[in-house]
Amino acid sequence: MLDQALERGKEALLQEETATTVKVDPAKICLYFSMADYGVDREGSLCLALSCSRGNFVNREHVGSLFCRKSPEGEWDYRSFFPGLEVQAGCLAVDGAGGLYVLTEEGILGVDGQGREAGRVSTSAYKDENFLWERLLGDPEGHACYVVQGEHGMSWKGVALGKEGNVLFRKEDTVSGEDWLDNVATYQGNLLYTYNQDGILRESSRDGSSDREILRWRDSDLISRNVRAAMVLDPDRILIWHEDQGEQGLFLLSRMPAGEVPRKKTVVLAALALPDSMADAVTRFNRQGGEYQVVVEDYGYSSGGAEGALVRLDAALVSGDPPELLLLAGRDLEGDMGKGLLEDLSPYLEASDALGREDFLDNVLEGYTVSGKLAGIPRQMTMKALAGRLSQLGGLSGGCTMEDVYALMEDYPGMCLLGDGTDYELNTREYLLGSFCAAYYLETFVDWEKGECRFDSEEFRRLLLWVGEHGKETVRTSGIRFHEVGSMQEDAMLMESWLDFQEAAQWKAQFGEEIGLLGYPTADGRAYAHIWVEAPLGIVAGSPNKEGAWEFLEYYLAGEMEGTLSTRKEMLREQMEEAMEQEYIAGEPRSKGEMWLNGERVPYYATSPEMAGMVMAFLEEADFTPASGLRDRVASIVTEEAELYYGGSKSLDEVVEVIQNRVQLMLEENR
């Protein structure tokens, strides 16, 4: 870390010209250095621009900027501190004589080869009042250019920099009015190096006469979106600024002949669409330098060719050389296990030194157990559930049946079922049938083992009548409507919300009183939430390298994660404890964040132990059985045909008969 934070134990950082000193007491004050930009000059010296602040984790004060030059032999040529000076990303270019150009809010600062100020010049003449962005570009030879993007579109202006005792401008037409600067990595004379979201680094000439791919970041075991900047030093070396999981630094990539690349055993991961988190895990796993290399195969999947890719994937799974790992999202697990395509993961868990069944929520593993065999293990989850006023829910908690919902609405006539506080309308007939009540009727009126249904029953007719009474017509609008989250509507019984320990701290404020959690109605009244699990993986039974497949799967499951809820008990408890932890400043509780409430920003604080315990209990009871495509198709039939009754074009009996016949035929075709 910059030679141990520039030898923080020293008494001061010194700027030679003005002899301005920043006193540092290592026992009381911590200096924080954040890299703003970097460069390499023609002599191979590394040049850095760092923002410097001091204080503690809670209160931090910016104190200035530090500019450094380090020789190829590892010696510091200078480390010059400029008190109060603020710099920004893309602020540095070398001048070709050991000095620097530095972009500040006021203009461009010149730093000479001894680290002293060599002059300043304003950039205001090149910026309109609402300019979007500015930066410096440069190469090791000292060719430097200042560019600024105007308020509208991609109207770039560029001026070249020169130095004759001060910083001078001259017009640079070749970089004005172009749009390539959004993805520019570095600028070297007539060549531009750019990279995009696909993780490809390209070299092109500014006049458009040449363009070629240099590399893909993943071939260097790097996560492309974590590459903050790149500088091509020569055809065989690239210096990159890479930030990964809170750590950042400069890495030198060197070209390696194909024959010298270490040989590894290949583990093929079959995934038509790989989530970013799993792609990141693949990159980090490969970077470890172990025995195995994970290769992702998408079978030619694209937004326009999903069907053909699925056919090719299914053919590969039953071939003599199948992939080792299979992404299970959207798969029919009962069908895959019935065909013997997937390994039982239970023996792998039992033999693992890193993980065991006891590490995961019991209901998570139960949900992915088919015919006594564990098909997959989810790592993370997000879910939606319901919250309501405890005074109105009475004894209802956790799970509920449709009879409970009927009774609740009868006790509070005139109220709507769901509060409208999200980006779509909840109380429509389409939503109530297609989402809210779906688990109930898919369990109550369909016998999946026998392949039979009874949608012609009086119970189902009652459900359609109730939805017609309490639901309203779907109004199609262009775009997505976003609603401000505020106090829960007085005339609404329930709020549908993302279930999370930290989010729970906001719910009570929205309702204005004690609340309870409730699942969506089911046939047996068990706790049921709408659950999305992150990228569950299974091991293909016929794969030639099951050991390598499990090594990656174990690495993926045991890894650190951010954001969504974990399926591992220990990490879930840590997430709960973090949400309950209350910090104090001068004896007053420190807010965890702010929310909009009735048009005002209102702070919220730590989640209470009672509320956190309620969320944990719900997570431990929820049903994690993944939905199948067949169930979704049945729900689509119900909502589609029922709308004909609500619209008046068919009678209730006619619609019920059509639903019964269509679903029964589908069940028979899929036996």
Image (tube, rainbow, N blue to C red):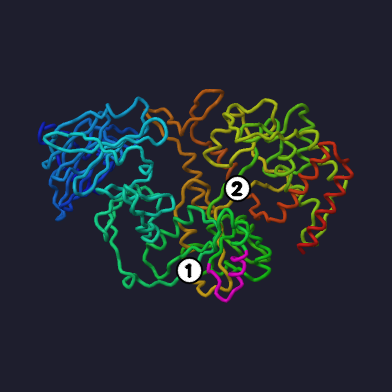
Query: Is there CB contact under 8 Å for labels 1 and 2?
Result: no
Q: Residue furthest bottom?
A: 320
Q: Residue furthest top?
A: 599
Q: Is residue 94 left or right of residue 447?
A: left
Q: Is residue 276 left or right of residue 423?
A: left
Residues in magenta, as a range: 311-324
Q: Residues within 10 Å of mark 1 (few under 14, many from 20)?
A: many
Say which of 311 and 191 sits in front: 191
Q: Looking at the image, which residue is at 35% across and 37% down? A: 177
Q: Is residue 50 visible?
A: no
User: Measured from the top left, where is residue 563 in percent x and y?
Assistant: 49, 45
Tell me the element at label 2: helix
Q: Is residue 47 left or right of residue 468?
A: left
Q: Looking at the image, which residue is at 73% across and 52% down? A: 633
Q: Report which residue position mark 2 lands on.
A: 619
Does the magenta-highlighted stretch encompass residue 314? yes
Q: CA distance from mark 1 to mark 2?
A: 33 Å
Q: Residues within 10 Å of mark 2 (few under 14, many from 20)?
A: many
Q: Is residue 455 left or right of residue 481?
A: right
Q: Is residue 323 above or below residue 394?
A: below
Q: Report which residue position mark 1 lands on.
A: 267
Quadrant containing the C terminus in the rendered view = bottom right
Say which of 209 and 483 sits in front: 209
Q: Is residue 394 visible?
A: yes
Does the magenta-highlighted stretch encompass residue 94? no
Q: What's the amino acid at mark 2?
A: Leu
User: Measured from the top left, where is residue 615 in percent x and y?
Assistant: 59, 43
Q: What's the amino acid at mark 1?
A: Val
Q: Nearer the viewer, mark 1 or mark 2?
A: 1
Decide which of tag 1 and tag 2 comes sooner along the chain: 1
User: Measured from the top left, where is residue 454 in percent x and y?
Assistant: 85, 52
